[in-house]
Image: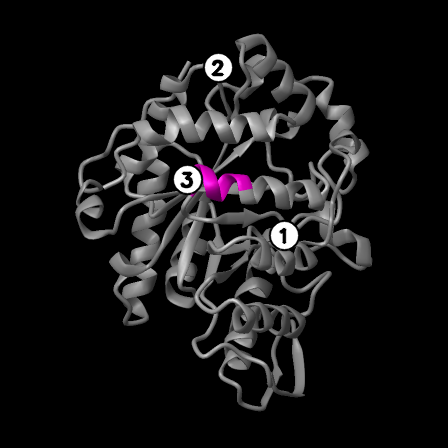
Amino acid sequence: MAWRVTIPRGMAWRATLRTMTKIGYAAMLEQFHPTELLDWCAEAEAAGFSAGFMVSDHFHPWTPHQGNAAFAWSFMGALGQRTSLPFGSAVTCPGFRYHPAVIAHAAATLGAMYPGRFWLGLGAGEALNEHVVGGYWPEIGIRSAMLFEAIEVINKLFTGDVVRHKGEHFTLESARLFTRPQDPVPIYVATAGPLNAKRTGRNADGMITVGAADEKIQMLWDRFADGAREAGKDPTGMPKLLQIHVSWAPTRDAAERNAVSEWPNGGMPFPKQDIRNPEDFAAMAKQVSPESFVNRVLISAEADDHAAHIQGFVDTGFDEIHVHNVGRNQSEFIRFYGERVLPQLRLG
């Protein structure tokens, strides 16, 4: 069954103020070997996924069965060479595994190597990936404060000036980035709540969300716009990116099996930021059934269902929609979308 997305009153104007929506490919390093994933990214570019690539940044997979978790920054360096489209991290957490200065260093390097192509996606993080360095795992309010202080540090370093910073969460002593792109790398923040959406509009260049009800998307965009205007920015020109998860296979039964076996975390209707180990997710996955994915992951073998699902988000006004197929059948999925789904979409 396909989701249907209607445009709430007041939202439709966004479609008239943006450029054409582009569809991208979500490169999920927690599921696939990086060498295979490079091949699939190249196939996706050839098939018409013109927005480029959202690259997941994980230290662990969600479940041991997923079987991978390559270092995203090594992968993105190779991705820039292998493809010609934009790409970015979705998302990197500053402050635990990475000090903000290290993220700024890495992002500036990719920006210098691939001008105009790399964007930096940041978020408040998950214990699954960040607890590995030890220490206290704080509540979401503290993690959010860390995120936006980290953005302040990164933006200071992007200027090329010598930076000193002593804040509530981070210290920087006489640091300067010598290798930088001509224009600073844009920063997009992943958020799902009104407070952080407003802070994102104020402090970042764009916003990343996941699939949600129309009313929630509208609320997030409104708070994002409020924050942007407070900072003297025009929100209509700031990118709004979406990541969605689908399960496609030649039959409905196969698509259901793929969702349950390969992406059970997508059927868990509760916050996951505080769960520390893949083994814990595997234990919870025993309770997941195909019904668990209703209104969370589209499961269908039909091209029309996939096209209608994505078209709803296109009509809502997203600038980029990055699609993740949860099964192992990536080449088949890319070919199916390139031949039967993408041509149906009205992206203007």
Residue 295, horizontal then vertical, whole percent: 46, 23
Binning the other alpha carbons within 10 Å of mark 2 as few (below 14), some (14 to 19) or many (20 upward) gives some
Q: Is residue 284 left or right of residue 187?
A: right
Binning the other alpha carbons within 10 Å of mark 3 as few (below 14), some (14 to 19) or many (20 upward) gives many
Q: CA distance from mark 2 to mark 3?
A: 20 Å
Q: Which numbered disc, 2 or 3, marks the residue closer to the eye?
A: 3
Q: Secondary structure at mark 1?
A: loop
Q: Amino acid at mark 2?
A: Ala
Specify the segment rendered in magenta.
43-49
Q: Secondary structure at mark 3?
A: loop
N-terminal label among 2 and 3: 3
Q: Which numbered disc, 1 or 3, marks the residue closer to the eye?
A: 3
Whether tag 1 and tag 3 are in contact, CB under 8 A, the answer is no
Q: Secondary structure at mark 2?
A: loop
| Residue beneath disc 1 | 125
Binning the other alpha carbons within 10 Å of mark 1 as few (below 14), some (14 to 19) or many (20 upward) gives many
| Residue 318, placed above or below residue 103 | above
Residue 243, horizontal then vertical, whole percent: 47, 40
Q: Is residue 207 left or right of residue 95?
A: left
Q: CA distance from mark 1 to mark 3?
A: 31 Å
Residue 106, horizontal then vertical, whole percent: 63, 69
Question: Which colour scheme appears in the figure?
Answer: one colour
Q: CA distance from mark 1 to mark 2?
A: 33 Å
| Residue beneath disc 3 | 48
| Residue 84, placed above or below residue 220 | below
Residue located at (78% from left, 25% from top): 283
Q: Amino acid at mark 1?
A: Gly
Q: Amino acid at mark 3?
A: Gly
- Whether residue 148 appears in this view of the structure is yes
| Residue beneath disc 2 | 301
N-terminal label among 1 and 3: 3
